[in-house]
Image (tube, rainbow, N blue to C red):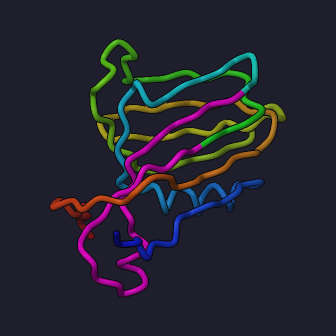
Amino acid sequence: MTKENISKLKLLAEDVQDLNVFSAYLQDSVIVANDIKFLPKTKKLICVFNRFMWEDAEKGIFRGNKRIRSALVFDNVLVVKSQGINPKKKTKILEFLAIKTEIKNNYFDIRLIFSGDSVLSVKAEEIDSSLEDFGKTWETNYKPKHKI
């Protein structure tokens, strides 16, 4: 039995700068609509991504391209709206681009932006979020590329 020598993310966000860090770690992650859940009674939004592990490239570590399941959780959420995301198409793959945050009328307007002009808009009372990896990693042949 081999043990993976992987440092899993376990991060908390309490301000816009923290969410910018989440955005960088989640860049090029993929998710399907079925892995996005808003629980209004508990004011919680949960998004489970297949996260591309960019931190390996940042550290100069070469062990192949890997992905890992990663849960992004927002607490104190009042409203969640989507644009270009059809909840009936539960297995349509959405490619994550960035998190953008603004303050509007004393609330936080947090936008999860995906390719194809798809956006998940989150209205929250405060920034209270976590990003945590779980499960085993897996290798992927695809490495996202960006034009400079």
Q: Quadrant of residue 88?
A: top left
Q: Residue furthest bottom?
A: 60
Does residue 76 appear to the left or right of 112 in the view shown?
Answer: right
For the C terminus, which image quadrant? bottom left
Which residue is depicted at the point 60% across and 52% down? 131
Which residue is depicted at the point 33% across and 21% down? 90
Which residue is depicted at the point 29% across and 26% down? 91
Total residue callouts: 0
Which of 131/24 is in front?
131
Which residue is depicted at the point 81% across and 34% down? 125
Does residue 30 appear to the left or right of 48 in the view shown?
Answer: left
The stretch of residues the image draws in magenta is: 44-72
Does residue 70 appear to the left or right of 115 in the view shown?
Answer: right
> Where's residue 130, x and y in %?
66, 50
Q: Quadrant of residue 118?
A: top left
Instruction: Note whether 69 is above or below 144 in the view shown.
Output: above
> Where's residue 61, x and y in %?
35, 84
> Where's residue 38, x and y in %?
60, 23
For the N terminus, which image quadrant? bottom left
Instruction: Note whether 73 is above or below 68 in the view shown.
Output: above
Instruction: Note whether 100 is above or below 31 in the view shown.
Output: below
Which of 84/88 is in front?
88
Q: Residue furthest left?
A: 141
> Where's residue 99, x and y in %?
53, 48
Q: Residue furthest front?
A: 1
